[in-house]
Image (spheres, rainbow, N blue to C red):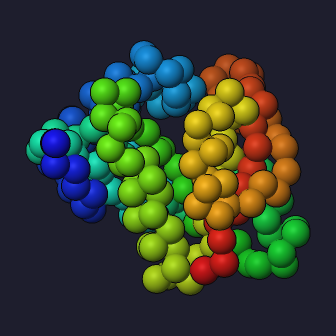
């Protein structure tokens, strides 16, 4: 059985992670943004921490915790909980290439981000497109709670329905 590893993202991972992102977009239509400049999207200034998933030494997945920004999931959670924005992180840029999906890398990457949130006193939020039912099942299995619906905006005025989630208590 191939050896799966989750580890912190390193600068040397950028090209492989960008290639994996492009592959996931081609097979799944995710993400809906960032594909035209994947390296820039992965290394955004909003990234607080990131991890990669490796299978037999090849980068096949990624996840990041981002600073809160103008996102519906952040505003929904601050309104519902009264938590200040400084205590919120955004789980984002989670992807695993199709050929590596039977190794629980998505779950392991999500758990790495959740651990970071706990260690830093952050409650994590996210939005997930309603078409991504397997992602919603993963989050719900890990104890995430839906907090509302929104439209995920991208591109030149395009949008898609999404559900916002909050992680279990930190």
Give the vertical position of 37 relative to 143 (above or below).
Answer: above
Q: Residue furthest front?
A: 1
Q: In this view, does 96 lie to the left or right of 126?
A: left
Residue name at image x 87 percent, y 68 percent: 79
Q: Residue furthest top?
A: 26
Which residue is at a point 42% across and 16% down the rendered structure image?
Answer: 26
- Name the outermost residue toward the left: 57
Residue 23: image quadrant is: top left
The answer to whether residue 125 shows anywhere in this view is no
Q: Which of 37 and 135 is in front in this view?
A: 135
Q: Which residue is drawn at 47% across and 31% down?
A: 34
* Placement of 118 over or under 158, stated as above or below: below
| Residue 71 drawn at (x, y percent) | 71, 51
Looking at the picture, tell me which residue is in the foreground, 165 or 40: 165
x then y, percent, for residue 146: 78, 54
Q: How many labels does the image show?
A: 0
The answer to whether residue 49 of the structure is visible from this angle is yes
Image quarter of the C terminus: bottom right
Which one is in front, 154 or 51?
51
Decide: is 49 above or below 44.
below
């Amino acid at each position: 059985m191939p050896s799966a590893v989750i580890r912190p993202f390193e600068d040397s991972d950028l090209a492989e992670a960008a290639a994996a992102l492009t592959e996931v977009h081609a097979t799944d239509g995710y993400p809906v943004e960032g594909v035209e400049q994947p390296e820039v999207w992965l290394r955004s200034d909003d990234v607080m921490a990131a991890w990669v998933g490796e299978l037999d030494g090849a980068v096949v997945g990624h996840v990041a915790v981002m600073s809160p920004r103008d996102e519906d999931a952040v505003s929904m959670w601050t309104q519902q909980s009264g938590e200040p924005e400084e205590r919120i992180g955004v789980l984002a840029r989670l992807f695993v290439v199709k050929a590596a999906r039977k190794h629980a890398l998505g779950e392991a990457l999500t758990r790495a981000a959740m651990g970071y949130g706990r260690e830093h006193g952050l409650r994590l939020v996210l939005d997930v497109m309603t078409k991504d039912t397997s992602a919603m099942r993963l989050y719900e299995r890990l104890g995430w709670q839906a907090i509302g619906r929104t439209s995920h905006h991208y591109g030149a005025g395009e949008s898609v329905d999404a559900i916002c989630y909050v992680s279990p208590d930190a």
